[in-house]
Image (cartoon, grey):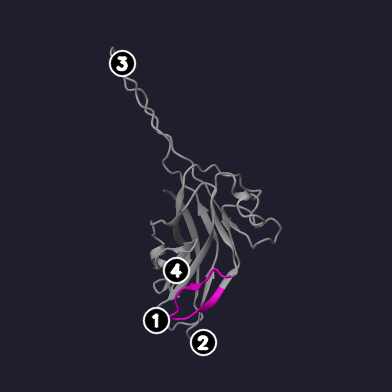
Amino acid sequence: MDPRKVTLLRSVLSLVAVVALGGGVTYALFTSNQVTVSQTQVTTGSADLKICNSLNSTPAGSNTWKTSVSPLINFDGISPGDSDVDISTGVSIYVGNDGGQLQDNLGAECNSYDATVTAGSSTVDMKMVPVVTATSCPNLSGDLQLRFGFDGTFTAYKTITNWGTNTSALGPTFAVDDAKLLAMQAKLANGVTLQDENCTFDVNFTGEQV
């Protein structure tokens, strides 16, 4: 066995929707007889994300818009010193800013909502904030680095450990009902000599209003 080879596993990619501030403020009306500040109302916009693995059609209906996907991915081709290794090869995972019409955007791919979810009602444009959670990577979390991209625009590389506390959004902007293909790339630091090491984790995306 190649002593430099490390097995990389990815598990669930889940989505968390957030409510982003939008909408308007109702201002008070003032009269000459009375000074009254009426109730000030702040209304938030609606934000809703969905995810779809367009290649997952077994069982039937699995390639639908939902809130989490569990692609069967087992990547074992990263060696020390490698960079920009595409670890999302073989999957086709889309993330969408769901305003209720995601099913119409990708042709034959991801063209319906899962039976367990309802169409969204997002009203705000968003960027995505990736966070790595549920990590089981005891010996590689400081050496294995990941980056995420949509439409060829990538984040900077961060270690597994640092992605766990990430708060930065990546570009580009997702307009309402926009769906983009997710890419994940990895690199491994020089000098890693461990073999037969597994690294599993979940990737979560939160929408941040633009």
Q: Check disc 2 and report the residue beneath it.
A: 2
Q: How far apart are the two marked residues, 3 and 2, measured between alpha carbons?
A: 82 Å
Q: Check disc 1 and report the residue beneath it.
A: 190
Comes first in the chain, label 3 or label 2:
2
Comes first in the chain, label 2 or label 1:
2
Q: Residues within 10 Å of mark 4 (few under 14, many from 20)?
A: many
Residue 85 in magenta? yes
Task: Specify the principal SS of the magenta part.
Answer: loop
Comes first in the chain, label 2 or label 4:
2
Q: SS for tag 1? A: loop
- The answer to whether residue 86 is above or below residue 5 is above
Q: Quadrant of residue 131?
A: bottom left
Q: How far apart are the two marked residues, 2 and 4, measured between alpha carbons?
A: 22 Å
Q: Check disc 3 and report the residue beneath it.
A: 31
Q: Position of residue 39 (x, y in %)?
A: 37, 25
- The answer to whether residue 136 is above or below residue 20 is below
Q: Please give the name of the residue rendered at 45% of the width and 59% of the height, measured from the top-left corner.
A: 130
